[in-house]
Image: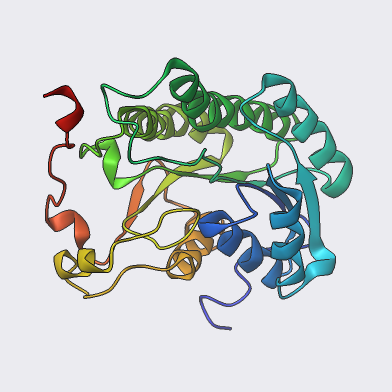
């Protein structure tokens, strides 16, 4: 049998993916059902979720869930609904993140935008991870979580609410991995580069900074995401960050924001 065949055990494993309506979350959720894994597609947009499921290779294995993870009451609702729909969630992917506006630099971002970004990225990511881990510990079942961070966890993006939330997620991965490893629950980070998906419209000229010579696609991340999530392929991997950026992180490509309106 091939080392990479049957990476999941569909009879015993199920997944929850936030931000599954578009971009990287959508690509990973679709790839999971393609491997036979029952998967909750969670997103703030019902229209996006419906389209993502319709385009999935095994839509009958996909469960839609619609809610805004900026609100705390949605976190428990998602956990309850996911458990009711697919049983014990063993694989969790946190890809949800509010839209980004280039105008929201350090001198312009408002408190509501800051709060929403932190709430969805960090607070929801922590709470969902912790509560899913508690369920796994109680059931004595192994698990694998993947939190999407960013190159901008370490490189300024001119969007401080976004970059700082991703930096917090990067440390959260390490904290959870250190605490939960004894229970056979693995926590890792997926670190995308310039990916033309999920509302991010990449300037084609950015490709000149990328050693592989092109802007990335959401589908570029799904194979590695599945490999890291798989307890058969990556059983001895936790607390790691996997960069998928075509080599973009080898350069620092952002200039300071334009502040003409202050002059």
Q: How is the image coloured?
A: rainbow
Q: Residue at x 83, y 49 (%)?
A: 86
Left or right of 119 on screen, residue 62: right
Left or right of 35 on screen, residue 154: left
Q: Residue at x 79, y 51 (%)?
A: 64
The answer to which of 95 and 87 lies nearer the viewer is 95
Residue 141 in the image, given as x and y percentages of width and height:
69, 41
The answer to which of 169 and 97 lies nearer the viewer is 97
Q: Residue at x 53, y 58 (%)?
A: 23
The answer to which of 261 and 51 lies nearer the viewer is 261
Quadrant assignment for the C terminus: top left
Q: Residue at x 27, y 74 (%)?
A: 214
The answer to which of 138 and 155 lies nearer the viewer is 155
Residue 25 in the image, given as x and y percentages of width and height:
56, 54
Residue positioned most to the bottom? 1
Residue 222 in the image, given as x and y percentages of width and height:
50, 65
Q: Quadrant of residue 39?
A: bottom right
């Amino acid at each position: 049998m091939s080392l990479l065949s049957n990476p999941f055990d569909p009879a015993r494993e199920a997944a929850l993916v936030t931000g599954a309506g578009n971009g990287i979350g959508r690509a990973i959720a679709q790839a999971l059902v393609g491997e036979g894994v029952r998967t909750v597609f969670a997103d703030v947009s019902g229209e996006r979720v419906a389209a993502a499921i319709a385009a999935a290779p095994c839509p009958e294995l996909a469960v839609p869930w619609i809610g805004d993870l900026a609100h705390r009451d949605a976190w428990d609702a998602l956990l309850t609904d996911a458990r009711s729909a697919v049983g014990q969630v063993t694989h969790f992917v946190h890809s949800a993140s509010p839209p980004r506006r280039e105008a929201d630099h350090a001198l312009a971002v408002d408190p509501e935008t800051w709060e929403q970004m932190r709430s969805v990225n960090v607070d929801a990511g922590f709470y969902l991870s912790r509560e899913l881990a508690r369920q796994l510990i109680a059931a004595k079942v192994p698990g694998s979580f993947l939190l999407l961070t960013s190159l901008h966890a370490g490189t300024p993006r001119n969007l401080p609410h976004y970059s700082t939330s991703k930096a917090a997620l990067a440390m959260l991965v390490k904290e959870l991995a250190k605490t939960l490893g004894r229970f056979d629950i693995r926590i890792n980070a997926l670190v995308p580069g310039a990916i033309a998906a999920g509302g991010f419209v990449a300037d084609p000229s950015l490709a000149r900074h990328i050693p592989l010579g092109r802007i990335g696609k959401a589908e570029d991340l799904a194979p590695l995401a599945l490999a890291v999530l798989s307890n058969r392929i990556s059983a001895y991997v936790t607390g790691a960050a996997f960069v998928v950026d075509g080599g973009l992180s080898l350069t620092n490509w952002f200039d300071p924001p334009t502040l003409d309106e202050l002059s």
